[in-house]
Amino acid sequence: DQQVKQNSPSLSVQEGRISILNCDYTNSMFDYFLWYKKYPAEGPTFLISISSIKDKNEDGRFTVFLNKSAKHLSLHIVPSQPGDSAVYFCAAPLPRSTGNQFYFGTGTSLTVIP
Amino acid sequence: KAGVTQTPRYLIKTRGQQVTLSCSPISGHRSVSWYQQTPGQGLQFLFEYFSETQRNKGNFPGRFSGRQFSNSRSEMNVSTLELGDSALYLCASWAGILSSGANVLTFGAGSRLTVL
């Protein structure tokens, strides 16, 4: 049961341009979302998050947008840099749960071309 | 503050064997969860331990088990290994939901298991 979906396995973008990574979810109870970045041979690292009470959260070059009615979120990276080349996962914790259980998308591999 | 430490980083086993992976969470974190990452499947939740008790469990067969010690270190075990168990096994440390509302898992580098 894939409650968080990333339908684009890969994305290539020219350095300096905008990268847009998309994520859809099916569970309307989700109230918090995260993006993680993963380099080969490393664990995922937290990048940015958003609460469902907001529709946008910005941190430097990274902005996450949330469209609750469409059950869709996106991560914008502007400007894209070669060091941004990695796999990006969106995730959501099971809400109102004792403890933690996070649902992850299948990831989008971003390549930023110099 | 030391991060999440997983050992071993790489290991190769043959079908039918068993394997034990270890994880030390961030100091002070009492929750440890385990995830399996395979190509095309993303990260799949295995289980979560809190204060030595399994608190949540994902949809994996009983061959996958875990435990947590009083110092919060955790181990996961996979018995009777199958080829499909080849994956990156990630351990995550959790501080709980912070007063800011932040709710973040911190991952270790993972243990890469290859089953031949």
Image (cartoon, rainbow, N blue to C red):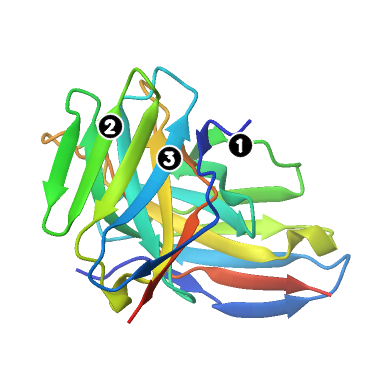
- Local packing at callout 1 (Cα closer than 10 Å; few below 14, some 14-19, many 20+) is few
In the picture of the structure, the residue carrying the numbered disc 2 is A66
Q: Amino acid at mark 2?
A: Leu
Quadrant that contains the C terminus of chain A: bottom left
Q: CA gap, disc 2 to disc 3? A: 10 Å
Please say whether residue A9 is visible from this viewpoint: yes
Q: CA gap, disc 2 to disc 1? A: 27 Å
Q: Amino acid at mark 3?
A: Cys
| Residue under the image location 50 percent in, 53 percent down | A107
Residue A55 in the image: above or below residue A11:
above
| Residue under the image location 15 percent in, 40 percent down | A57
Which circle, 2 or 1, is nearer the viewer?
2
Circles 2, 3 touching at the beta carbon (< 8 Å):
no
Q: Position of residue A77 (x, y in %)?
A: 25, 57
**Same chain for the residues under marks 3 and 1 in the image:** no
Q: Amino acid at mark 1?
A: Gly
Q: Which mark is residue B58?
A: 1
